[in-house]
Image (cartoon, rainbow, N blue to C red):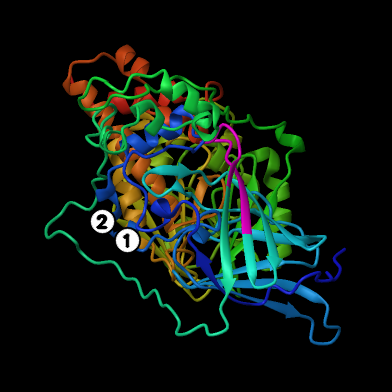
Amino acid sequence: MTGPAFAQVDLSGTWNPQYLEDVDERIPGPALVDYLGIPINPQARQWALSWDPDRLGLPEHQCQVHTAAYIYRGPLQLRIWEERDPQTQDLIAIRQYTSTYEQNRTIYMDGRPHPPAYAAHTWMGFSTGKWEGNILTVYTTHLKQGWHRRNGIPSSDKISLVEHFIRHGNHLTHVSVVTDPVYLTEPLIKSEDYLLNNNSGGNWLWPCEYVEELPNADLTKVPSFMPGQNPFVHEFADKFHIPVDAALGGAETMYPEYMKKLKDVAHAQGKGKGGGKQAAPAPVTVRPQNPALANAEVHTLKVQGNVYMIVGPGGNTAVQVGDSGALVVDTQYEEVSDKIVAEIRKLTSKPIRYVINTSADADHTGGNAKISRAGAPVIGGNLGAVAFENGATIVAHENVLRAMSEAAEGKADANADLLPTTTYFQGQKEIFFNEEPVIVMFEPAAHTNGDSMVFFRRSDVLATGDIFNMDSYPVVNIDKGGNIQGVIKALNVVLDITIPKHEQEGGTYVIPGHGRLTDEHDVLEYRDMVTIIRDRVQNMIKKGMTLAQVKDAKPTFEYDGRYGSTTGPWTTDMFVEAVFRSLSPKK
């Protein structure tokens, strides 16, 4: 149940920031390797020390904006107004417009719940508010990856944000509390002050488009510093005569007691590239295992156009529906097939006509038989014998059929019902279905040697299969023809296809093999991460390091809290080994 909210204070108006605190950080911006006063953990520190500002010159980064957890720190006009029910005048939401990037934010005041965890994340996130006396308190989730400080300190897409808007006459104070389980050791609290502006002046606009900043540049390379090779480590510390350890931040640098420690620290420190605190191992977030499949729940989320995402224990199933029936991408496990069919029946009463497998993995193909039998084929001359089968056509790359046939050899004949009935060999297979071009694209030597991605061109949705997973590092099955170079190539294909809307958000949506719904920016950060790890391992191989030495060097360190795992079917060690084997000279 939802109900109206009763405003205690009217925050409406246009507010201009007063730069009374942290002015050097906010205008013109923080210095490189100035992490002082931020409660970062070792992973965040290594992420920041590896960050090369040249990365912002890559096309997909050029129009990147800030999240709701950071945007209030910069130069902007903040316009606030109320949305009320036209009949009852109950307060439905408080809306905000921040002029820097033309960002609109809605704070719902009617008690509605936050979206499920698998919903898409945005720069402004999803916000609900309530009045605590004369203070508006706002709770925000579903934020994209952004900055804790825009000189390389990352904020993860797992953050939660609590804010307090406090008005005293023409004075507004904004206090934010950010909790980040991936990159912060304790909450980060910030505040800003604003004055009411009765003459708001003109509007700021953000008509951003990609440009080529360097002619003939390789836009698939991600600028970064190798661990220990950041050339700017001493720059800020030397300018202000403080120890490098202080500039490298951490929770202790937030408190007055740290001043006593500084008096006991000699300023003279050995100079050279790198330096400072060394990243130490930290607890790793363990990827949860699948629950008992028979009791697993499945949920459906509308993406856009004709496409939906069904979330279950086998990852994500994409479903396109329309007058011609349903097209299904990946069928998850057999044990949840009936539940997936039931979800599809909620979307359409038309037959399931096509099933597409993005790989041969059991969590993508296990439900093929049941879901195909729940449908009916499209009768057509080019389908040959398939036209006389009783179920939906199962489409995959030839290598998927080969792998599944080998796996089924010698087993019960029932395994034959899982096999693709129509295959393609190279390039792409095109299907025009439900008044929409559906393009099945082959990506060789990526997750395996038979990966496909499926692009719904009119709905503007791309399903990637396990080439892209938001819950783990890429699964690179070397023994089945996978290769880290092919994964990166495929991720760059995704970036070529996807086109975001304003503020580098939305536009083309991407359904990953596992994890929440995403857009281009999410894929971009993932591509950057995988490329940086590839380059580090490549550098170690050139130095003659063994696999054991590479693992000990922890090339994935700052990303383990988000994507790593020490148990389960795909661990961090397995990923590092797959990268190492992909890049090692063939014997």
Q: Tag 1: Cα neighbours inside 10 Å, few (<14), some, or many (≥20)? A: some
The one of 577 and 1 positioned closer to us in this rendering: 1
Q: Where does residue 397 sit, x and y in percent of width and height?
A: 39, 47
In this rendering, is residue 225 above or below 217?
above
Q: Where does residue 502 sit, x and y in percent of width and height?
A: 44, 71
The residue indicated by pointer 1 is 62
In this rendering, is residue 54 above or below 110?
above
Residue 43 makes an appearance in the image: yes
In this rendering, is residue 492 above or below 90?
above
Question: What kind of residue is marked 1?
Answer: Gln
Residue 448 makes an appearance in the image: no
The residue indicated by pointer 2 is 57
Q: Where does residue 254 sit, x and y in percent of width and height?
A: 53, 35
Give the residues drawn in magenta, as a range: 174-189
- Residue located 59% across and 29% down the image: 412
Question: What kind of residue is marked 2?
Answer: Gly
**In the rendered image, which quarter contains the C terminus?**
top left
